[in-house]
Image: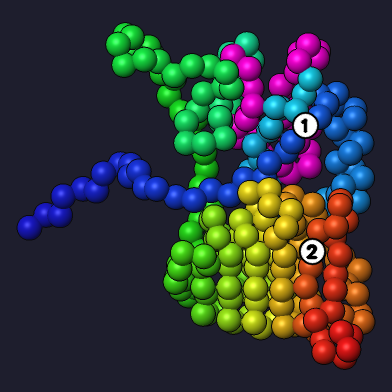
Amino acid sequence: MQKSPSLPIEIKISTVVAISTILHSADPLAIDAALKQMTGGVADFFEDEFAVIDVGAIAAGAAPIDWRALVDLLRRYRLNAVAVRGATPAMAEAIRARGLSLDDGSSGARPRDEAAPSAAAPAAAVPAPVPVPVPAPAPAAATAVVSPGAMIIDTPVRAGQRIYARGCDLIITAAVNNGAEVIADGSIHVYAPLNGRALAGASGNPEARIFALSMQPELVSIAGVYRTFDEGFPPEMARQPAQIRLVGDRIDILSLSPASRA
């Protein structure tokens, strides 16, 4: 019997991790200078991450935003803008013209201060959502158990895999290898060697921390504040138990070895 052809498209729920780029100015020169300082000239600092542009902190009455220049500038730093958060209704048309979605920070897609249509009002035409590329799913080797307060991973996280604990801590009992990426809205606990990239407080929690029994990451982030280790992890704490926390705008590394705390 001939097998019926599969559907030309399938729609499935998928988690897409995006970096929040919070703007306090729309001046391209100022943003460019800040990104240069942030990345330290490292060409692959962001590695083609998705980005949500947050304009809620820009003062009312500021000059209109040049969306084309802003999107092109972010792309030069390998940040792919996919949506705008905190936009006013007056910005909506220009934002959609650049192929960006409107994100109200929750599950909807309305700009701020724009009222939802009432049930009695006639339905307005809703623009089709802009499709967002979804990263390839991680290989099946990483199995997860989600408890109310944490996601638990009991298998190694290999190069090319990305694990995201949405709304909770991430606990990993096996090694995180070079080229892997682990992300949590809460804290990250690795009871094994931590290599690769670790991003805690991904939803903006500055109190989140990163713990590991053997610390040697390529990059760490707490609430969007990054630190890379292109010159190697500090030798006095490399491959040792340590924690990483955010103090102001600085990433701090603290030893967890008993001798250092005696």
Q: Taking 260 as reference, is 37 above or below it? A: above
Residue that numbered label 2 is attached to? 245
How far apart are the alpha carbons under marks 2 and 1?
Answer: 23 Å
Q: Is residue 30 above or below residue 184?
A: above
- State which quadrant residue 36 falls in: top right
Q: Image height check: is 233 above or below 204?
A: below
Amino acid of disc 2:
Arg
**Is 10 left, or right, of 238 in this rendering?**
left
**Kind of residue sitting beneath label 1:** Leu
Front one among 177 and 120: 120
Label 2: state its secondary structure. strand
Disc 1 marks which residue?
Answer: 23
Instruction: Residue lying at the far front in this picture: please name it.
Output: 262
Question: Can residue 63 be seen in the rendering of this structure?
Answer: yes
On-image quarter of the N terminus: bottom left
Q: Which residues are magenta?
A: 60-89
Q: Residues within 10 Å of mark 1 (few under 14, many from 20)?
A: some
Residue 105 rendering spot, x and y as whole percentages: 57, 35
Q: How is the image coloured?
A: rainbow
Is 79 covered by the magenta stretch?
A: yes
